[in-house]
Image (cartoon, rainbow, N blue to C red):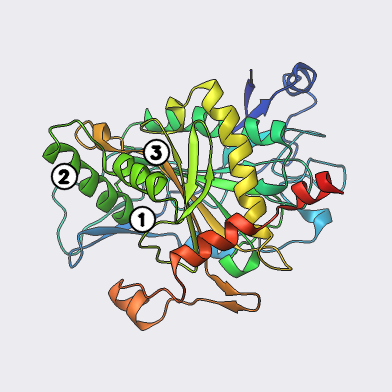
Amino acid sequence: MTLITPTRLSDGRELIYFDAREESAAQHRDAAATSDARGLPPRGPAGTARYDALTGEWIAVAAHRQSRTHLPPADQCPLCPTTAANLSEIPASDYEVVVFENRFSSFGPDLGALPAAPEWGTTATAYGRCEVVAFDSAHEGSFGSLSPARARTVIDAWAQRTEALSALPGIKQVFCFENRGADIGVTLLHPHGQIYAYPFIPPRAATLAARASEFYEASGRTQTLMGSALAAERSSGERMVIEGKHFSAFVPFAARWPLEVHLVPHRQVADITGLTGEERDELTTVYLELLGRLDALYPTPTPYIAAWQQAPVDDVLRPASYLHLQLTSPRRAADKLKFLAGSEAAMGAFINDTTPEKVAEALRSATPASARKDQA
């Protein structure tokens, strides 16, 4: 069982320790040992959101993020445990997993509802919340380098935060994700991810939810779109990468990116909160294996975006939604990246440079570093 210990940083931001071990949790319950000694000034006002009447989308304007920390040296890392020489964002001498409100937040800290009938020129407060998830106290690594026990605690943290953030006023979508690698634009090398709680349903999530809802209604509410896609992929086998008892990973039939994999539970759940303990256990091992296979493709670590597609906080769209992970990388060769050029960036029309079947075959053949160690 994961133990949860909430506290506050000196500027009022919430910080939560997630511990699998009682001895760690006991240390974090000691207020004197984990108080934030920095004396930070109060948080500034939230940014703004502007309505794009041409697309019907909301755009966050967060100019204050220009001053955020960028690739600091290890001894100044804001995600490492606090020391006398480095008063970091995490005021403890050690930790397992930590979640805290982002100091340079794109959304929030104010909560509320965006205008219901926006038009050209509508500007509103960028309501919502952005959180940082520090996966481990070690300075270098990523989710794929975590031990199974630590990865399992991160999954519990995602679930707890998804449930808590979904209950906040005005929140329409909770998005857990990890950006990995400088080529993706990562500004901190410490193993971490983020959670965004949006005051609207983002465009990609809205498209997925609408398509899922259309399919669900057309089937008489007996089938889900992702469930049908999963069944077809498992039956074909051409693009399957990993098949477990509760989860399968496959390269989607119409993959957009040079490397793209969907990790899907065999049972429909709306979000990570709905996974059972047994399902979370298998997710831990399957997810780590998948990331290991991704890294085994080339001599250097593969940059990626790991995006958890969860159901919107919407009573109409939620019944048809199906939790899944969308793992993508722009890497198309050992020394080449795919950039979003004219067709992709301007028109949203993707052109893939390889076939999903070849990518799936390469991932099936790849041997993760952990497996190579076991064979040695």
Q: Earlier in the sequence, mark 3 or mark 1?
A: 1
Q: Residue at x 41, y 54 (%)?
A: 47
- Label 3, label 1: how far apart the Cα atoms are: 30 Å
Callout 2: few (<14), some (14-19), or many (20+) C-alpha neighbours within 10 Å? some
Q: Earlier in the sequence, mark 2 or mark 3?
A: 2
**Which quadrant, please, contains the N terminus?**
top right
Q: Tag on residue 48?
A: 1
Q: Tell me residue 121's x, y (percent).
A: 20, 64
Label 3, on which residue? 323
Callout 2 amino acid: Glu
Label 2, on which residue? 214
Q: Tell me residue 124's x, y (percent).
A: 28, 52
Q: Tag on residue 305?
A: none
Q: Tell me residue 59's x, y (percent).
A: 33, 60
| Relative side of 166 to 215, left or right | right
Number of the front mark, 3 or 1: 3
Q: Residue at x 85, y 42 (%)?
A: 83
- Label 1, label 2: how far apart the Cα atoms are: 33 Å
| Relative side of 245 to 60, left or right | right
Q: Nearer the viewer, residue 204 or 275?
A: 275
Q: Residue at x 64, y 67 (%)?
A: 182
Q: Tell me residue 85's x, y (percent).
A: 87, 48
